[in-house]
Image: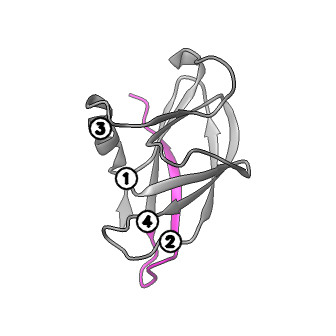
Amino acid sequence: MKICAGLLLAGALAGCGLAHQVRLYPGPPLPPAQVARLVLPYSVLLLKVDAAQVDSTGLEYEFRPGTYLLAVMYCDLALRDYPSEEIEVLFEAAAGRRYQLCYEFFAGNETAWRAWIVDVTG
């Protein structure tokens, strides 16, 4: 089963002021045209970027353009009583673009899953 619905939830939460946005670069905030934004489903945690620990409480992350290796984990304890295994996803971030992390579990295995990133810029 493929899941790529987090964008709607994150958008709704952002409209209510509840979404937590995390800037993953040093210095002052940059204009939207100079950063890439990655939206995660509420059930996926971003644990590391290029092996460095990050604030895992975000639903939306802001990156400078570049290539990143992300470590993510599915963790929806309302639906499952244990988190999934941690996996890595390659992220090619382009300035001014908005991305969504999507995922699916492998049939017949409750812990094996894969994730990919889709450009959802309107």
Q: Which residue is painted at 38% across and 52% down in the image?
A: 42
For marks 3 and 1 on the same chain, the one whose residue lies earlier in the sequence: 1
Distance from disc 4 to disc 2, alpha carbons, whole Å, reads 12 Å
Kind of residue indicated by mark 4: Glu
SS category of the residue bearing label 1: loop
- Residue carrying label 4: 104
Kind of residue indicated by mark 2: Ser
Task: Report the side of 96 relative to 122 (left or right).
Answer: right
Kind of residue indicated by mark 1: Cys
For marks 1 and 4 on the same chain, the one whose residue lies earlier in the sequence: 1
Distance from disc 2 to disc 1, alpha carbons, whole Å, reads 17 Å
- Residue carrying label 3: 13
Spot occupied by residue 61 in the image (x, y as percentages of width and height): 52, 37
- Residue carrying label 2: 84
- Residue carrying label 1: 4
Is label 4 in contact with label 2 (beta carbons under 8 Å)? no
For marks 2 and 3 on the same chain, the one whose residue lies earlier in the sequence: 3
Q: Which residues are magenta?
A: 104-122
Spot occupied by residue 90 in the image (x, y as percentages of width and height): 65, 50
